Structure formats: C-alpha cells, structure tokens
C-alpha cells in the first residue's frame, strides 16, 4: 500500500527502484505486541528465522575455500555457537510468550539485555564479542523479513539503512544502487557531500524508513525534498516522469549560462571555484568555466584503501587533477581525516572521547610527519604540471601554519636536490573552520597567501551543534546572526590585508543564499560543479552595490527569521 515517508533531502535527484533494507546492528524496532492467539505463530516465525540462519551459516561454512577459509570459518563457528546458546533462544521464546512481544521486539530486548552484560565486562576482547552477537541477531532479523543478508546490491536498487559511511558510497554506486535512504544522518555530513558529488540521490533523517520499508518494495525517492514514496501509485509515477522532464528542461536553460561570466548586474566579477572529488568533477568544472579547483579533499584517497597511498600514487592523482584543469589553479587540501572520517589504514585514533574536537585535520598530519611529508612531496611534484595551491584544514592559528610552511619548504628543497622540477612558490592557504582562528585571523595573515572558510565545520564549532546530528534540527544553520557576523569579520580582515577569501562550505553552493554572501562582501565561492550554474545565475541576477548598501541591515538581524526577511527584501528589489 502507498505510504509517504518524510525525510531530509541531502543529494538531489529523483530515483525509482526496489528497496534493499539493511538493518542496523542495534535494532531500532519499536515496541509491538501480538494478540494471545498469535503467540504460537510468532514463536514459530522466530524459530523458522533461527533455523534459516543456521542453515545459511552451514552452507556458507561448506562453501569456504581459499586463503582466509580458516579464519572466516572460525567466525562462522562462533556465530553458530551463539545461535545455539540457550540464553539467547529460550530468553526470546519467553519474551514472546510472557510479554506478548513481536519476535522483532523480543530480539531487540534480548539483544539489549546481553549488550548490558557485555558492556559490564572489563576484558576488551570479550567486550568486542558483542559485535558477533549483533551480527547473528542481524541475520536472524533479516530472516524474519525473509531477506538474504549481505548479498551484493543489484542494479536499480535503493539502499535503505540506518546510516551510510562515506567509504561505502562509491562502491554502492558501482553496483548500480540508484539512491540511498537513511533513517539517521544529516545533509551536511561527509556522506552527503560525497553523494552530491557522485550525483547519487540521498535522503537522510527518514525516521520511519526502517520500520515501514520492506525488502523489494518499490520506492520513489526525491533527493531534494527528502520524500520517499513506498509503492508509488500512477499519479506518483506521472509526477516522477514530469520531474525528470522538468530537470532536463532546467538543465538546458542553465546550460546556456555555461560560457557566460559570473558577473553581477553592476559588473562585479565573482570567482566561482569548484569543489572537486573526482576527475569527472574536474571535467565538469573545466567545462563550466570554473576559476579553478577551490577544494580537492585528498582524504577520500585514504578512505578507499587499506594501505596508505604511496607518494607515487598520490602524485599521479594530483597530477591528473592539475592536468584536467588545463592551466587553471588547483587547490589541494592536505589530509583532513579524523572526526567522522576514519581511514582504513588506521591513522585515525578510534577511541577519542570527542573526535570532532580531537586529532583531526592538520593536527593529525603534524602528528604523523612521515605521512604528511609524503603528501606534501606528492603535491609539490604535481605542481610541475600546472598552478597548484595548498590548503590546510582545521587550522587553529599561526604556529601550525608556520610549521606547515617549514615542512613544505624543506620538502621542496629535498625534491629539487633529487632532481625534481618544482614550481618556484606554491601558494599556501588556511581553512578557516576553528572559530578562534576566524576571530584571530589578523594574527596570521602574514603567513598565508589565501584563506578559505569551511562553513560546514565553522558553523558546527561556533554553534556547538554537531553537523551530523539531525536531532538538532535548525540549531545547526549558517543563518544565525553570530555566524554572519563572523563571516563578515573574516572577509573584512582578508580584504584589509589583501588576502583573498573564499567560502568552500556547502552554503557557497546554495544559490538562494548567494545574496547574503555577496552582501557580506564575498567575492570567491567554492562549490560543487553540480550547483555552479545555479549560483552563477543568482550572481547575474543581483546588483553588488545594492547588496553592499544593505549589509548593515543584514548584520542587525536578530534571528533566523530576521535574516530570511532581509533575504526576501533583497531579492525582491
Ligand atoms: C567545511 O568544513 O566547510 C569544509 C569545506 O570541509 P569539510 O566539509 O570537508 O569538513
Ligand atoms: Mg571542514
């Protein structure tokens, strides 16, 4: 039956496909009861699922061969043992019979009970066995819904899950997954940023998704509004076809702006840099007339593989990036691992209490000088093929920039000694994401050549609101008077010291907010190529001088509503 499930749009695009439900380790199953006359059936349903799980493990065990057969086999044996554990099964039967719970909810209760026992253990190894139990419970749960767990995705499927890691997205798309719907997550997470760059429609915060969607359901996903329709009716399908036509029409219309300048009505040229994650992004950036690449996030290279990428591997990627821009400057951001981005090679410490406030960005690079120097060498070598700028993430202040500059100079010297051709001087820039660095920018303008404001992080640190926590709702928003005042301060400080200032956070790609950023004095935007033409259009529609005359009024806004009123008035004029 048709159902409409609301969520938040995180990566635009419409998709129609069949659901593949991936249940979370911790089962988010709501409390549900069965009628007394259904109890036997429910126990039977549970036993059938346990039996199916046992048979599945048996057949997996029998099919094992090759190098890892022994290790994997041991895991399967362990899982089979857990499955026979009377503690687990009798407890489940009892919960269904005495509490009249559904098998799903009984599974969750039992899981939570056992988790509490595991949690109380001192032994880290035993504690980690909870993961195995979760795995087994996940398989039983999957069988309760008659789906085969962990089978590779099939083309045309839509993944429905509690969350999705940035490292999974590219692989999912390669398997032909056409959209992703998550129950948790935020539109500003790294997963969302990557999904946008992959043009993979993504809906986050769709709270009911895991309860209401079953494997194989046909879903219609709108990555702009966040709506997911289960079992769409003919009207939905007609609207979907209309949306596809509309998207094609808009693309044609915007396409006419491809070769037009990003110039306001009164003739002020605005630089539109591209945030590029892939060579496809680079090709698009080039074709759309981007000023250059304003942000290339190198950590994605580290997320994709188990070993740290070598100097040679990195060099080739950076060189191709530079070649792809055909002589326009390319801004390579040094490694920004940590917080919600953990590499597979294990650079990121997994047990920090507050990873977002921990060893991330340049802090991590300086803590691993060998890894950092390898990256700097690769970047320096790529600079031989075209103009390259180096951008440093999560900078707190002067000392870090001085240290990075020292390392960069030393690496250049060594490379030259080894006979490499290196550009004379690479521009070095700081990401402004730490509020203290924004406030005290005057203290290190002499050691940077440019700055780029990372509003995604700056907003989270300024408002003490996790960018990945959807429960915070509008608390995480750049439309806060404090945020606008700080942006104004950074843009002004840059102008006073002749330091170019860009914004490379997601707000730069939101065409609706362009008048605000222009009013704050911003002249350089760095955004994903997918949004470049929309922002160019917004820039061409306004008068820079007129917006400047309204800056004071904007800064006087006392709340989000005031900022929105200002925006409405500015656009109407
Ligand atoms: C930012 O924080 O705004 C930014 C561009 O960096 P990232 O999103 O990669 O943290
Ligand atoms: Mg950031």
Image (cartoon, grey):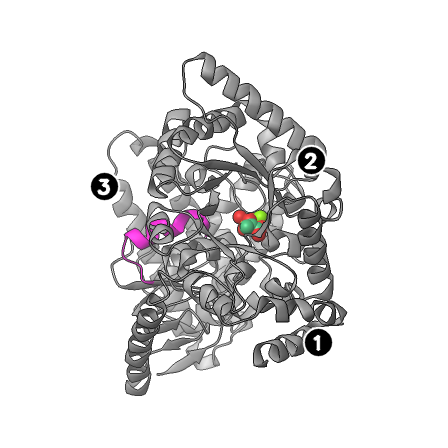
Q: Which residues are magenta?
A: 165-178
Residues 324 and 466: in front is 324
Left or right side of 302 for 234: left
Q: Earlier in the sequence, mark 1 or mark 3?
A: 3
Instruction: Name, please, the residue furthest toward the bottom.
Output: 235
**Whether residue 308 is visible:** no
**Position of residue 445 measured from the top left corner of the image (x, y, whole percent):** 69, 39
Q: CA distance from mark 1 to mark 2?
A: 36 Å
Q: Earlier in the sequence, mark 2 or mark 3?
A: 3
Q: Which mark lies nearer to you, 1 or 2?
A: 2
Label 3: how many Cα within 10 Å (few below 14, some 14–19, many 20+): few
Q: Earlier in the sequence, mark 1 or mark 2?
A: 2
Report which residue position mark 3 lands on: 63
Instruction: Name, please, the residue furthest toward the top.
Output: 417
**Position of residue 264 measured from the top left corner of the image (x, y, whole percent):** 52, 66
Q: CA distance from mark 2 to mark 3?
A: 64 Å
Residue located 47% across and 77% down the image: 34
**Position of residue 229 measured from the top left corner of the image (x, y, whole percent):** 38, 77
Instruction: Name, please, the residue furthest toward the front.
Output: 267
Residue located 34% across and 45% down the image: 279
Q: CA distance from mark 1 to mark 3?
A: 64 Å
Residue 562, numbered circle? 1
Quarter placement of the N terminus: bottom left
Residue located 61% across and 76% down the image: 570
**Position of residue 73 measured from the top left corner of the image (x, y, whole percent):** 33, 37
Quarter placement of the C terminus: bottom right
Q: Main secondary structure of the magenta part?
A: helix
Left or right side of 317 for 393: right
Which image quadrant is residue 300 in?
Answer: top left
Residue 446, numbered circle? 2
| Rendered position, 26 above or below 341 | below
Residues 14 and 169: in front is 14
């Amino acid at each position: 039956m048709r159902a409409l499930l609301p969520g938040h749009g995180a990566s635009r695009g419409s998709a129609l496909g069949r659901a593949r439900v991936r249940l979370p380790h911790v089962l988010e199953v709501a409390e549900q009861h069965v009628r007394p006359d259904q109890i036997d059936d429910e126990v039977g349903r549970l036993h059938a699922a346990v039996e199916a799980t046992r048979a599945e493990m048996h057949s997996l065990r029998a099919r094992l061969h090759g190098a890892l057969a022994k290790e994997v086999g041991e895991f399967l044996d362990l899982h089979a043992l857990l499955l026979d554990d009377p503690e687990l099964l009798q407890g489940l039967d009892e919960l269904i019979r005495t509490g009249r719970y559904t098998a799903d909810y009984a599974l969750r209760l039992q899981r939570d009970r056992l988790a509490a026992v595991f949690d109380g253990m001192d032994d880290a190894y035993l504690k980690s066995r909870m993961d195995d139990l979760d795995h087994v419970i996940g398989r039983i749960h999957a069988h309760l819904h008659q789906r085969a767990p962990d089978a590779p995705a099939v083309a045309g499927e839509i993944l429905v899950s509690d969350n999705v890691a940035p490292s999974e997205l590219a692989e999912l798309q390669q398997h032909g997954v056409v959209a992703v719907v998550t129950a948790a997550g935020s539109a500003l997470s790294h997963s969302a940023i990557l999904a946008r760059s992959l043009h993979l429609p993504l809906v986050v915060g769709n709270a009911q998704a895991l309860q209401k969607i079953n494997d194989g359901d046909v879903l219609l996903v709108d990555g702009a509004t966040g709506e997911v329709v289960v079992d769409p009716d003919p009207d939905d399908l007609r609207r979907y076809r209309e949306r596809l036509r509309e998207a094609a029409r808009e693309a044609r219309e915007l396409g006419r702006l491809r070769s037009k300048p990003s110039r306001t009505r009164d003739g002020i040229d605005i630089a539109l840099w591209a945030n590029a994650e892939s060579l496809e992004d680079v090709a698009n950036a080039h074709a759309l007339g981007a000023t250059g690449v304003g942000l290339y996030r190198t950590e994605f290279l580290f997320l994709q593989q188990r070993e740290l990428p070598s100097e040679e591997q990195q060099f080739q990627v950076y060189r191709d990036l530079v070649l792809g821009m055909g002589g326009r400057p390319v801004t390579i951001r040094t490694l920004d691992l940590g917080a919600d981005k953990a590499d597979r090679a294990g650079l990121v410490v997994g047990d920090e209490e507050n990873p977002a406030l921990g060893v991330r960005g340049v802090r991590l690079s300086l803590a691993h000088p060998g890894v950092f120097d390898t990256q700097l060498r690769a970047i320096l070598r790529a600079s031989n093929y075209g103009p390259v700028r180096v951008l440093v993430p999560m900078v707190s202040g002067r000392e870090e920039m001085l240290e990075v500059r020292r390392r960069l100079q030393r690496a250049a010297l060594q490379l030259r000694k080894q006979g490499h051709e290196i550009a004379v001087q690479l521009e070095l820039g700081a990401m402004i994401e730490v509020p203290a660095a924004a406030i005290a920018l005057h203290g290190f303008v002499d050691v940077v050549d440019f700055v780029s404001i990372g509003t995604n992080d700056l907003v989270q640190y300024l408002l003490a609101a996790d960018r990945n926590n959807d429960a915070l709702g509008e608390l995480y928003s750049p439309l806060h008077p404090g945020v606008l005042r700080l942006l104004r301060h950074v843009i002004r400080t840059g102008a006073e010291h002749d330091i170019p200032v860009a914004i490379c956070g997601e707000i730069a790609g939101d065409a609706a907010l362009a008048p605000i950023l222009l009013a704050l004095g911003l002249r350089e935007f760095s955004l994903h190529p997918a949004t470049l033409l929309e922002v160019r259009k917004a820039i061409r529609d306004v008068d820079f001088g007129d917006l400047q005359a309204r800056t004071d009024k904007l800064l006087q806004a006392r709340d989000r509503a005031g900022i929105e009123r200002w925006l409405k008035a500015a656009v109407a004029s």
